[in-house]
Each structure stands twice: as structure tokens, then as C-alpha cells.
Image (cartoon, rainbow, N blue to C red):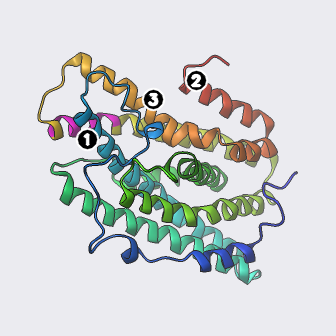
Amino acid sequence: MTALITQSHTYKASLEASHKINWRVEDIIGGEKHLDFTKPFLPESLAGVQAIHSLNDREKLRLNQIRGNSYLYLFGVVEEFIVPTVLDHIQHIGTTDIIATQAFLCFAEEEGKHIHLFRCFAQDFEAGFGSPCPCIGSAQEIADAVLQHSPLGVALAILHIEWMTQRHYLESVRDNQALDPQFCSLLKHHWLEEAQHTKLDALMIQTMIQTLSDADIHQGIEDYFAIVAFLDNGLSGQVQLDLESLQTAIARTLTEAEKQEIQAAQKKAYRWTFLGSGMSHPNFIKALKELNPSAAVRAEDRVKAMQGKSS
């Protein structure tokens, strides 16, 4: 089987890069560093608010910021199941390769730091936005549901998320002068560490599959798609919560026609943001092809279906 990652990406290289990148939460949020609520948080490619005809510019800005809040909350949710997955893998590999163990310990520590960062963001957002914006949960229940699947299925979902993170920042956030600089700073620091996590997660999958049968690998792929379906259902729930938050924030009751327009636009935007952009990332498709070519075709077809395109 072809390696999921080039051999130039080693545990030592990832560990050294993480040590160079290392940042502290208190250095990038809190004190004088606050969100600017006069600016959008998410790029339009992720927020999908500008084509909603029933909202004026002020209302679109509020919806964009609501989406920014849920965006980071949902990242915090997925990291709730990344941390235990990495810690379980550390127990599996032991200390025979101590550099690998150190690299994965750093991976877990950084994901914990991201959870802390996003919780600090939530506090700053709540203090400045002016009205409540609930999110799906609880995070622990969502993590527990995901972790019921096989380790390979969860690891593939994590790889999807890591490549998704790279795509979001590099394609639509970096150098985007229209967005709130503080929000961009949070995403930049998150991206810097996630760049190493894509490599470590691919190495983790390579280690896993060495001891798995073809049937086990098949089950892992099935579990990955089951996790995608589970997350898709959760995103639909978040769309409804965002709609309620928007009505409160703009102090008006939307008509049924307006609700339908907003729901359709936001469901499409959420699906691309958290599912399509990761599932269709060339490096993730490459990993699926190396496990099972039909899995890559299945992923590509799923993305086309989300986008309303025929196969």
C-alpha cells in the first residue's frame, strides 16, 4: 500500500516545527485584544450570507458574526474527540519510538490549547455581540457519539478536519483585509499548529492500517462516512439555532419565506464549510484512494450531491 504521507514528513520534523511555532492563548486574546463587531468574521466563501435577498447589509453582518461564533464553537467540539483519539494512540504505540510519542503528546497538548482558545473567544463574543447565540451540544455528547466508531474511522474524520482547516485559512482567510483582524489572528494561530497535525494524523493512520485486515479497513471507511452523516445532521440543527439567534439579534420576526431562504443558503454554506471542503481536499482524496479507490469516488460523489451537481 502506498504511504499516505511522504517519508520526508517525520515525527522529528513535526516535533521541531511545533516547538518553533508554539504560542500561548493569553498572547492572542484578552486584555486589549478584542473582536471588532463592525466587521465580518468569516469570509463569504464560508459564511454564505451575501446572496440572501431578505436580509439587509446590517443583518447580513450580524449573521456572518453568528456564523463566526458557531464556526469556532464547532471546531472546539471536534477537538473534544481529537484529544482522546490521540491519547489512545499514544498508549497504543508506547515509548518504543520516543520521538513519535513526544510528537503525539505535543499534538494532544495543542488541541487542548485550541479548545481553551475557542472558549476564550466564546466569552469575548458573548460580551460584545449583545444577544445570546446558542450552539448544538453538548460537546461531550457529540464527542462520545463519534468515538463509538472504529479508531480508523475517527482518524479519517480527523484527517478530513485537519485538511479542511488548511483549506479555509489558505484559500479565504489569509490576507483577507475585509475581516476582523482579531478573528483572523485566532484562525492564523490555529492554522499554524494544524499544519503539523495533518502530517501526524496521516502518520497515525499509516500505523493503524499496518495491523488491520481488509475488512477492518473497509469498516473504518464506512465509519468515516457514518461520522460525516452524523455531523451533517448536527449542522442542520445549528442552522436552526442560528436562525433563532439572528431574529433576536436583528430584533424582528422573519417571515416563513425569509426563513426558508436563509435556511437553504445556510445549510449549503455549513455543508461546504465543514463537510465538502474537507472531503474534497486533494490530499484527503489522495489518502482515501490509497486506502480504497472506491472510497475516494464515494467522497467526491457525496460532495457533488451537496453542491447539487450530477455525478
Q: Secondary structure at mark 1?
A: helix
In the depicted view, which residue is nearer to us: 160 or 230?
Answer: 160
Q: Is residue 141 left or right of residue 302?
A: left
Magenta highlight: main SS = helix
The disc at residue 268 is 3
Which image quarter is the C terminus in? Answer: top right
Decide if residue 146 is in sight here: yes
268 versus 165 height, above or below: above
Report if residue 86 lies within the magenta region: no
86 versus 180 height, above or below: below
Earlier-in-chain disc, 2 versus 1: 1
Q: Furthest residue to the front?
A: 177
Q: Nearer the viewer, mark 3 or mark 2?
A: 3
257 versus 99 height, above or below: above
Earlier-in-chain disc, 3 versus 1: 1
Check disc 1 and report the residue beneath it.
62
Q: How busy is the neighbourhood of tag 2: few (under 14 within 10 Å), some, or many (20 plus)?
A: few
**Figure quadrant of residue 144:** bottom left
Earlier-in-chain disc, 3 versus 2: 3
Q: Is residue 137 left or right of residue 13?
A: left
In the depicted view, which residue is nearer to us: 272 or 178?
Answer: 178
Check disc 2 and report the residue beneath it.
305
Q: Nearer the viewer, mark 3 or mark 1?
A: 1
The disc labelled 2 sits on which kind of residue? Ala
Q: What separation in Å lies between label 3 and label 2 (alpha carbons)?
A: 11 Å
Decide if residue 219 is in sight here: no
In the depicted view, which residue is nearer to us: 233 or 148?
Answer: 233
The disc labelled 3 sits on which kind of residue? Lys
- Which residues, given as a range, are shown in magenta? 239-248
